Amino acid sequence: MPGFVILALAIMACAGAFAAPAVLAKEVRLIPQWVPQAQFAGYYMGLKKGSYKKRGIDLTIIAGGPLRQSSEYLASGQAEFATLWLASGIQMRDHAVPVVNIAQMVRRSALMLVAKKSSGIISPQDMNGKKIGLWEPVFQIQPSAFIEKYGLDVTTIRQSYSVNLFLRGGVDVASAMWYNEYHTILNAGLNPDELVTFFFYDHGLNFPEDGIYVLEDTFNQDPDLCKAFVAASIEGWEYAFAHPEETIDLVMANLEDEHIPATRVHQRWMLDRMKDLMHPLSGGGISGALKYDDFARVAYSLKDFGLINSIPEYNAFYRKCYDESHQ
Amino acid sequence: MMKVTNRGIAFKLNLWILTSVTLIFAVIFTYTYLFTRDMLIAKIEQSAFDLARATSEDIDAVLLSVEKTPENIAVAMEQFRPQSGAFTGLIQETIKRSPEIYGATVAFEPWEYSTNIRYFAPYYFKGRDDKVEFTYIPYDYIYEDWYQIPKELDEPVWSEPYFDEGAGNILMSTYSVPFYDLNAPEKKLWGITTADISLAWLQEIVQAIQIGETGYGFLITKNGTFVTHPNSRLIMNETIFSLAEAKDDARLREIGRRMIAGETGFVSLDCEFSGQPCWMVYNPLSSNEWSLGVMFPKEELMADVFRLNKIVIGLGAAGFILVMFIIAAISGTITRPLRALTRVAEDVATGNLDAEMPEVKSRDEVASLAHSLDNMKTSLKDYIRDLTDLTAAKERIESELQIARDIQMGILPKVFPPFPERDDFALYADVEPAKEVGGDLYDFFFIDEERLCVTLGDVSGKGVPAALFMTITQTLIKTRATQNLTAGEVIAWVNHDLAQENPSFMFVTMFFGIFNVKTGDLDYVIAGHNPPYIVRANGDLEMMPSTKGMALGIREEAQYSAAKVTLSRGDMLFLYTDGVTEAMDPQNDLFSEERLEAVLKEHGRMKVGDLVKHIMQEVHSFADTAPQADDITMLALRYTPE
């Protein structure tokens, strides 16, 4: 990272010019795995409110999206920090990209299946003989395990990112993120009492989702930076949950900058669900810990479905960066 | 606060009449308003439906004609299985000929067009200057809604609208028709044909709906997404349901559900754009099941009714004020003379009977009241004058009566002891006249050296006649007693004289006695009178035996016999009239002979003057507050020879 070194030198050179005891802010970049919606509001609020700055981090957030894959940015060094699903992180490590998880932010899976009660589906067994919409492979692991678990005979249909196929009756069961597509379905006029939902979390198939990743080198060179980054991110998230309107203002402004159509109600729903997903059910704040059980469940499932060749070593993959004394 | 009942007539008239008028007006106004409003609403509803249907039909006409193109191509593909050059030419030609169609394709299932080609979807579209251009759809189109939905549903489908970035970010919708490989043993999808249309014309049609200043139309898709709306922020961004969520409006959500369910309706709600209350009519498009909503601003459409209301209220207010003035004027003509009459009545009440009557020109109740008041004043005047005369007459009579009474009392001897040179007997008498001139009498006189006449009587009736009768009686007794007659003869003669000239049938009861002061013998006659008592020197009380004979003055030839008692030294003769025994206390109990006898037994030894005074005292304290009804007369004579 020559740019980083040059910049650091430049800052050191400049430091003499300032009378005050200069804290050398480290310039880093974060790329979330998708567009700057409320799913990533905590990082943006942490940046806006100075959570990173006061820990000596000069952060730039690169908006993710279909044209900017966070995994690619992380692997190529275009960003020092990235958010990824746990399954994606494990896959990357299996594909010889030395990423490490420094904080598991979302510890509950938001992935779910949803069906209309009018299609006769009330329980998992009712899905027999029905058409199920599934997303790309990384989102198929849990539904596939679900189908296997309940011994279902179903037709799987590749589902795009619109829910229109489901709304029009092209599939009986749709994949959905609780914080996103489920709300889109509600806002297409279906009432919650007309729908039946299957959260994988409730069916023993919890896959933790968004986590913060760095390259192994980054962690080894500056573990304090990683710890500071995680602490600042948690602070940003807690601030966002405590100030939803201010947070949604920022989210809406960011989405407008990216020319992404958005509605406040949808972003509010998403922020509320992120709060549900990030705060432990038992109460308390965000911990950032990746439990071995969760890691193992995801890794073994990936291997079972042939998406990875070998299971990464837990201690090498996960580097604890949060300070439990803060909790 | 002053109570209504205490207010003047003008106030009451105003209050009640104006209240009634206001109520009547309010009822009429409300009815008229409701009637005209409902009539207007019915008309608006009708024309709203007409407008919504007409607009829907306009849109459907275009969409239905567009549907024909991919449907025909699909039929051609199934029936003729044309070669690439043939169907691509067909697509090109249809695009050229259909001004509404922006682009079209025939997209095949993977490997179905050729075993060498996975995805085959030649796409023709209108470029600059409507020149038809060509490209292959470069991506995994089989997972696109326009491909996947008709494929899974096995039927033609209009897509949700989307922005086509390649075509200058215009709003598009695609009609997709599946076509099948009829050579396959089972029904097998071969591909999808499509026609893309720009929705700009559709937005124009809906935006052209202008109702008043603020009315508008909008279109939502099967998902509730806004396709057109005057608030451009909503278009392709919000659904009617997200709007309902933002506004926390469950009713709007329900309306949205009815709209996307293909229902038709007329509802009242707040306009999303202007914030004003609106009616909304909604009607589905039959082609793509979208729903057209048209907002009718209530205030603008009801402006005529509101203006009419204002005019009616204005007229009502003017009428109200007019009625108020009329009532004030009418009540003034009534109350002004009434107030004047009241002043006169007050004057009269204070005694001024000469108060001047106000002039009343009308001939109504007030006039007759004034007339009556005038009559009353005159009558009062006459009455008071009569009363004054009468009072004067009465006063004169009363003063004359007083004189008569003084004269009557003057006749009775009032100086005691009457014979101070004599000590062989003591005599005391007293009369307590009742208020009016009474008829009691007593007298005593010597007719020679030894004989003393004692008389006590009670004339029937009261007043002047009784007094005169008494005077006559007394005079007659004195006259006859001095003619040396016996007691019986004296009384017989007096009776004869009185009865002879007694047209008014008056009478007098009487005790008459001739007492010989030397011997103590007493000859006496009791003519219908209370028998007197003798209190013996030892205190024994005797009632004197009665004698034969009735009261004097009744029958001319009545016979009277005399009796005789002898008084010893210290014996006392006690005479009285029934004024003593018949004196009444407030409970109407009589003093009675028993009480008199008890007093005489106890105090019979007192000096005659003291005894009479004492009995008088006893009678008075017995009567207490009860008025004295009759003269009270007593005479006591104690024989005290040497």
Image: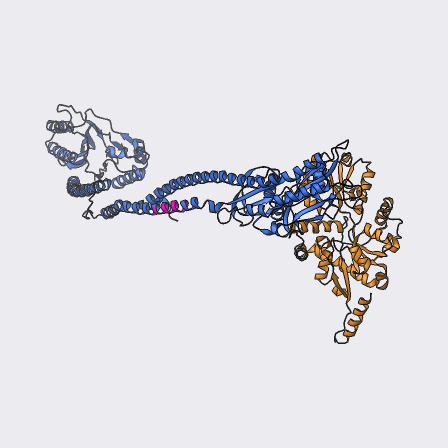
Chain colours: A orange, B blue
Residue toward you, B532 or B74: B74
Q: Residue at x 26, y 37 (%)?
A: B628
Q: Position of residue A83 (x, y in %)?
A: 78, 55
Which quadrant does the C terminus of chain B fall into?
top left
Residue B558, image quadrant: top left
Is residue B530 toward the left or the right of residue B106 in the image? Answer: left
Residue toward you, B245 or B135: B135
Is residue A294 toward the left or the right of residue B402 in the image? Answer: right
Is residue B179 toward the left or the right of residue B302 in the image? Answer: right
Residue B466 appears anywhere in the view: yes
Q: Position of residue B440 (x, y in %)?
A: 20, 35
Which residues are the magenta region?
B309-318
Residue toward you, B269 or B637: B269
Residue A165 appears anywhere in the view: no
Q: Position of residue B55 (x, y in %)?
A: 54, 41
Q: Magenta-highlighted stretch: main secondary structure? A: helix
Q: Is residue B315 magenta?
A: yes
Total labels: the figure holds 0
Q: Position of residue A211 (x, y in %)?
A: 79, 54
Residue toward you, B548 or B353: B353
Q: Is residue B283 magenta?
A: no
Is residue B323 toward the left or the right of residue B408 in the image? Answer: right
